[in-house]
Amino acid sequence: MTRRGRTLWLAGLVAALLVAGFLSWYASGSPDGLEHAAEEAGFAHTAEDSVTAGSPLADYLVDGEENRLSAGAAGVIGVVVTLALAGGLTLVLRRRGSSADRS
Amino acid sequence: MCNKLGGVHVPDGFLDPATSVATGALAAGTVALALRKAREELDDRTAPLAGLTAAFVFAGQMMNFPLPGLPVSGHLIGAVLTAVLVGPWTAVLCMTVVLLVQAALFADGGITALGTNVTLMALLAVVVGYGVFRGLAALLPRTRTGVLAATGIAAFLSVPVAALSFVGLFAIGGSVDLPLGTVAAAMTGVHLLIGLGEAAITVAVVGAVLAVRPDLVHGAARLRTATPLAGRPTGAATVLR
């Protein structure tokens, strides 16, 4: 990666960690579009708990603890896991050595 | 302040098993195809950006924004954002990874509904959104503004596309027998508003990457063969590749 590419990549990662680990605490808690529509149209009650509802990270909290630290940690874990899986997959799939500006 | 993130994602129970199996099969087939096709979009330069974009979309989807005057929130889908930055087939894979992580670890979106969520957000929002983007980009001037305008309109439309596709699935295999119009009416209005948020975030992010590394933006490939951008005398867009 070039220096500029690396700067962009790091800036993007910091932005993602900041949003997931800190800003998300201030996200709106109102029902989202689908939940709202389901209530309005009358099928919200048919939602079932996911089999992963007992996951230690369910609802974007660590062990269900409703505080900043728990929510922030859950967000950071999500970013890191997503980056590892999607980044690993795309690195494996890429055509190697096909880039002109490696450094 | 509240962190109760329900997630926009379709939970288990909204659609009957037959419909969930069908969307699951469609999702699996699409991902299998994308695993082959994405190779053409990914090289040493673009692969790191693809992984990062997925992580960014995960973060963006946590950030529910309020809709003005309504007790409703919305959040980024990120399908057009990802497709324009790293290519549509790679976007299918990135979006699928995000949805998988959300469903498996965070109980956001059902497990039996995973195929449905992949179909709506990783397949239809990407394919229709990117199709609209390409169509508009061909019509609009080959400038940064043209690319961003096409990006914004495509991002906006991708949200009602996903929402109305859910309405279609609910008509086929919904948990409750409701008139199609009732579900469509409840879904459309709020998702048009959420689409405006989707467009704003997508244009801001794609615009930021275009400003520093236009060569990395998959959907801006045509800018590279165009004349140097006005006001950018270094011709950064043309020399980087």
Image (cartoon, coloured by chain):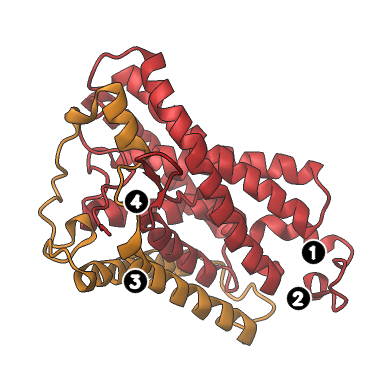
Chain colours: A orange, B red
Q: Circles 1 and 2: CB distance less than 8 Å?
A: yes
Q: Which mark is in front, 3 or 1?
A: 3
Amino acid type indicated by mark 3: Phe
Please provide percent x and percent y for residue B220.
71, 58
What's the distance in space between the residues labelled 4 and 1, CA to CA?
33 Å
Badge 1 or badge 2: first in the primary sequence? 1
* Residue B41 visible (yes or no): no
Badge 3: residue crowd in 10 Å (few <14, some 14–19, many ≥20): some
Q: State the SS at label 1.
A: helix
Q: Which mark is residue B21?
A: none
Amino acid type indicated by mark 4: Leu
Disc 4 designates what residue?
A: B99
Amino acid type indicated by mark 2: Leu
Examine the rendered structure and indicate whether residue A63 appears above or below residue B9. below
Disc 3 designates what residue?
A: A22
What's the distance in space between the residues labelled 4 and 3, CA to CA?
21 Å
What's the distance in space between the residues labelled 1 and 2, CA to CA?
9 Å
What's the distance in space between the residues labelled 2 and 3, CA to CA?
35 Å
Badge 4 or badge 1: first in the primary sequence? 4
Disc 1 designates what residue?
A: B224
Q: Are marks 2 and 4 on the same chain?
A: yes
What's the distance in space between the residues labelled 2 and 4, CA to CA?
34 Å
Amino acid type indicated by mark 1: Arg
Q: State the SS at label 2.
A: loop
Badge 4: residue crowd in 10 Å (few <14, some 14–19, many ≥20): many
Q: Chain of mark 2?
A: B
Q: State the SS at label 3.
A: loop
